[in-house]
Each structure stands twice: as structure tokens, then as C-alpha cells.
Amino acid sequence: MPASRSTLSALSRVLLTASLLALLPLGEGPRAQIEERGPRSDGPMDSSLRNTLPDGGDPLGIVRRLSDRGIEFRLSYINDVLGNVRGGQRRGWVNQGLFEPSLQVDFERLAGITGLRGYANGFFIHNTGRIRRDYVGGVNTIAAIEAMPRIRLSEVWLEQSLFGDAVRLRAGQLAADVEFLYSDLSVMFLQSDFPTISALNLPGGGPAFPLATPGAMVGFRPNPGFEMSAAIFNGDTGPPGREGVDDQVRNRYNTNFRVRDPALLFGEARWRWNQETDATDLARTVKLGGWGHLGKFEDLRFAADGSLLADPGSVGTPLRRRGTWGLYGILDQQLWRPAGGDALSGISVFGRISVAPQDRSTIGFYGDGGIVFANLVPGRPNDRFGASFIFAEYAQAVRDFDRDLARLSRNAHPRRSFEANLELTYLAEIRPGFDLQPVVTHIWNPSERPGGRNALVVGLRTRILY
């Protein structure tokens, strides 16, 4: 590995880990919690076009009548125009869009069933190409709505709250990236997504956009500042199929509803401080969690007979190992809170690190982080801007396999080491429910296809919420 890559790899790991450890919570105990993250079209109702259109965008009163009965629906559309202007696999531009209708039903208001609610959403996806896969050739997310064009069902579930909302029981078709392994501050960035270490190490990318799987979840919140969640998912997002065929092809409409594959388990604990709108101290959120998959996974260096997979004389069948897992930690830390500001205002930083087994994982170490400046532009109280960084290091077995291949093969092969992204973006609210977001992303060492050149992506996101 060249010295420059080795240096960036080491520095990235040290800085991301140190940032989380240095900012771990101190002082008085947890006091409050920000609102639970919702579906991909989440956001406060005052950010909807309904509050700026004549008659609230509801001239016939249909939306109001449904809402009075506990039936709420959202319509969200996100469009990205992105171009790879330098490096990568090839230059070019794409136009991609995600239309998402969602429906939430409060059965207490609708039918008098206390604490019961239901939810469903779907994805209408279109694009003229995929910026990450088709142009850059990397593994880290560049724009989180990238997916194969399709109309898909996403989540469908029922949730029962008990003991004054201290306990939540949810069952149906679930997506893990809605509940687990995300930072509240990071969601403004285009590259914020289910992290590479989970997407590449789990079958089919795991139950995350654009696929979900049947599952069940329990949440426990004894006080506003602490919560725990645990979930079990069907561990494969698609049916068995031909080697190398994407689960987005094998599960075309996300309606397979498989329940007999080995399970995927998730668990996460969350502590929150100073989330109230009238709080004056700095807000902080800490999350610790992990996942485990009960299926069988291939060793990425050794064959079933103990020989090297890269050896031409090997049996060629990978050694099979039972199960895989991952551990992670997440920190959202406010650095400066303006007078009267909420938990997400002012200047804040976030960080996330995760590790996985080095012998059966494609990515062994992952870290991301960034800084967000919110509500700081005079006359534009809802604008935000910032920078985020992603670092994904290939597992030791992957790097050893590439070295073995270079040593045992007569042909030179590029070696995988790490991939890193840096995104700079500004989110401008044109009017409530209508945002424009220019973005610049630099990708170091895009390595889905080894040997990729550093790439530069520029573009514009448009977001409409009704």
C-alpha cells in the first residue's frame, strides 16, 4: 500500500475514534429526547408545502377530515442531478429521483384502540444511471437515494405502545436504517445512509433502503433521556438466486415477505441530554449498538481445505464460518447553542465508528463524521450547511487475499485498502417544504472495481414535501 494511502488510513481511524472518545458524556444525567426519526419523508409539519399553499393545499378539506380521524399521509419527492466531473470509472451526469408516499394511522383516534398505530410507505424510483456504481465505481454512498429504477413497497407495520409509551412493540415489514445505526445530525447530507460496513457485510445489503424484510422490534424508554431498542429481521432481503445477481433484481417489488432465512439481530441503547427547546446547555446524543447475523459466511482468504483462495491449486471453495456481527458507537454533540435555539441549531459535530470480524467481512472498520452549521445565516433561519467525511477500510482478509493474488499470480492486480469521501453541502429552504441543496463530493480510492481513480462529483438536490 503506498505511503500516502497508509498515512490517510491511519490518521482517519485515529481521528474518528478519538473524536468519539473525547466527547463522551459528562455532567448531569439525561433529561430529554428529540422526536423519533420517521420515514425517509420525515420532517415537522411546518416544513410542508401544506402550510404555504392556499387553503393549506387542501381546498376540498380531504386532508383535514382524514387527519381528524387519525389518518395522516405524506408525499415526498427528492431529485438529484449529479455529475462525475473528474476521475472514477467514467465521466458523466445522472438524474435520479425518489417519490415516496407514506401513510400513518392512529387507531386510537380512528377506532378507539389505545396506543395502536400503523404505517406504510413505498418508493417510486427513477434514474438515468447510478452515480456511485456506474460512474465513480466506489462502495461508499454518494447519494442515499441511489437504487435500481422500480416501484417498490417499503415498510408496512403495526405498533402498540404500552405503559404510557414506555414500551413499543412493532411488527411487520421493517427497515433497520430507520431505527438503528444513524446520526440525527448526519441526515442532511446526501451521503448519509446505512453505512458501508453494514451494507457490504450483510446479505443483500441488509434491511435498508430500498429493501425491507419482515421483522419485529421492541423499544423501551423508562425516561425521556434513555431508550433501548432491539429487533429481529429476516436475514436475507431476497430469495436464493444466481451468484452475483443483486437482491434488488431478485426481490423486484420488495414483496417476497421471506421469514425462514437465518435471522439478523439488532440492538441499540441511546442517551440524550438537553433536547428541550427551552434548554440552554449543549445538546448531546450517544448511541451504542451492534448487530449479529446467524447465517453462514464465507472466509475471504482461506479455502475449505485450509489453502489460500488465491492459490491456483486451491479447491476454490471458501471456508464457511457461522455468523457475523458488528459493533458501533455514535455521537451527536452540539458545540454552540444560540439563545433560544433547539438541539439541532448552532454548531454541532457528529461521529460514528463501527467494527466487524476481519476474516468474513468485506469492510472491517468504518468511521464517519462531520460538522453542521444550522440557523446561522441572517434572514434564513432554516438553512444549514456543513461537511461530512466517510472512511471505510477493507478487512484484513480482503487485503491479504489481494497480496496473495499479487504474489501467486503472474498478472499484477490492484490491491484494495480503503475508500474515503468528503462532502460539502448547503441546504437552502426556498419555502417551507421546498429545499435546494448544492453538493460537492470528493472520493479517494474508489475501489468497488480495484484501481479506480480519485473522483469528484458535483450536483444539486431538490426536495419537495407535502
Image (tube, rainbow, N blue to C red):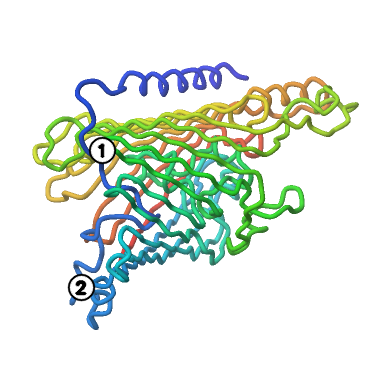
The kind of residue on which mark 2 rests is Gly
Asked where in the image residue 183 lies, by quadrant, the reply is top left
Give the residue at mark 1.
223
Residue sitting at x 41%, y 24%: 16
Q: Residue furthest right?
A: 313
Number of numbered discs overlaid on the protein picture: 2
At mark 2, the secondary structure is helix
Give the residue at mark 2.
56
Residue sitting at x 74%, y 53%: 241
What x and y, as percent, mark residue 138?
A: 57, 40
Task: Give the quadrant of the N terminus.
Answer: top right
- For marks 1 and 2, give the one nearer the viewer: 1
Residue sitting at x 66%, y 48%: 261
Frontmost residue, 248 versus 64: 64
At mark 1, the secondary structure is strand
Marks 1 and 2 close (CB-CB < 8 Å) = no
Between discs 1 and 2, the one toward the N terminus: 2
The kind of residue on which mark 1 rests is Asn
